[in-house]
Image: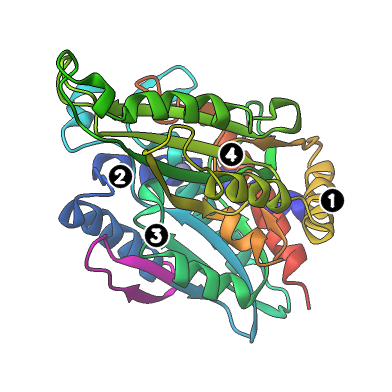
Amino acid sequence: MSHALLDYCLAREDWLLRFTETLVQIESPSDDKAAVDRCADEVARELAHLGGRITRIGATTAGDHVRAEFGAGNRQVLLLGHIDTVWPIGQLARMPLRREGDRLYGPGVFDMKAGLAIATLAVRAWAAGEVARSHKLVMLWTTDEEVGSLTSRAVIETEAGRSEAVLVFEPALPGGGLKTRRKGCGQYELSVTGRAAHAGVDPEKGVSAIGELARQILAIETLRDLEAGVSVNVGLVSGGSRPNVVADQARAVIDVRAPTQQMAERVDAALRRLTPHIRGAGVVVSGGFARPPMERTAGTTRLFDLASQVAGDLGVSLTEGATGGGSDGNFCAALGVPTLDGLGATGDGAHAVHEHVVVSSLAQRAGLVAGLLTRLTAA
Ligand SMILES: [Zn+2]
């Protein structure tokens, strides 16, 4: 069974490559609705051509999200990913789509247009199989993942809540490993107020917002616990107006990553408790965790074990690991739905100019996913 699905995918490697290339050639930066809509059009057109029942989920501040349903039944498995990329229009001219040996380079190819194509070929193989099914497949391709999934989060959570498993086609770990844990991602802004005064004439009348911010930064850095996987990075600071004026305002932007909800809450609470060190200064903390941690639950462990069995049947050993980056998989896992992430392409250079995928791994991956889908939906 597994071998037949793999053979089906290997026989369609050319189709998989062409679909990947087509998607890369339609540039789709998250913040350009017209552009990302064009790419969504292509995805919807291809999935409809393959027999998917398409729903376009309109968004005004992002591109439209594309939902496609295959098969029948009330129970469902969700295949999830994003159409948008971090690259602006024109990047394709600067880093053209090109094949070098076993590598295919291009903006968005690894994160995650090849993943979208892999999922599509896997669904084709699944649909071609003549077996009884207990579940339908739902694909959801969103358009604002790279900018925090503001318009897609509710849609993702609704679909994940209806699903018995979620497969996310973000890039694989180096060597093809799956991602079963992701850190939660928080962003906070600390605004500090002081009192302006002439730095030479009457400095004693001033309260330095910058002096206060400096003390706050030292306190914030003690919240870091790298051994436990908690990172707290003050990545951006600004403040003051001129060298001869005591600064009346300053701010810092802080990136926080935490592997568990408990740790995320600990840092969140500590940041919200910050109080001024200097009399007369004020501090206000805003922000929060945009993506909750994706923890390795018992359900996810069972799902990974099943994927490992399918891989084993194909003579492949599957590994798993964690990453500090967040994805839409975080939302699904936080709802308690078994979630496997990193089912997309093997390659390197996400968000970097050497972004590429390993061509020979793509159809292989589709075969694995097809086998997993078949096992998950078996009646
Ligand atoms: Zn991505």
| Marks 4 and 3, the one that precedes in the sequence | 3
Residue for point 64% across, 86% down: 74
Q: What colour scheme has been applied to the protein in the rendered image?
A: rainbow
Give the CA distance from mark 3 to mark 1.
28 Å
Q: Which residue is mark 1?
A: 305
Give the CA distance from mark 2 to mark 4.
35 Å
Residue for point 70% across, 33% down: 229
Is residue 320 visible to the viewer in this orientation of the structure?
A: yes
Give left or right: position of 124 versus 90.
right
For badge 1, the amino acid type reads Asp
Q: Nearer the viewer, mark 3 or mark 1?
A: 3
Q: What is the magenta range?
A: 49-67
Q: Which residue is mark 4?
A: 257
Relative to 197, residue 12 above or below: below
For badge 4, the amino acid type reads Arg
Residue 48 location in percent, x, y?
Answer: 37, 70
For badge 2, the amino acid type reads Thr
Foreground pick, 162 / 217: 217
| Marks 1 and 4, the one that precedes in the sequence | 4
For badge 3, the amino acid type reads Thr
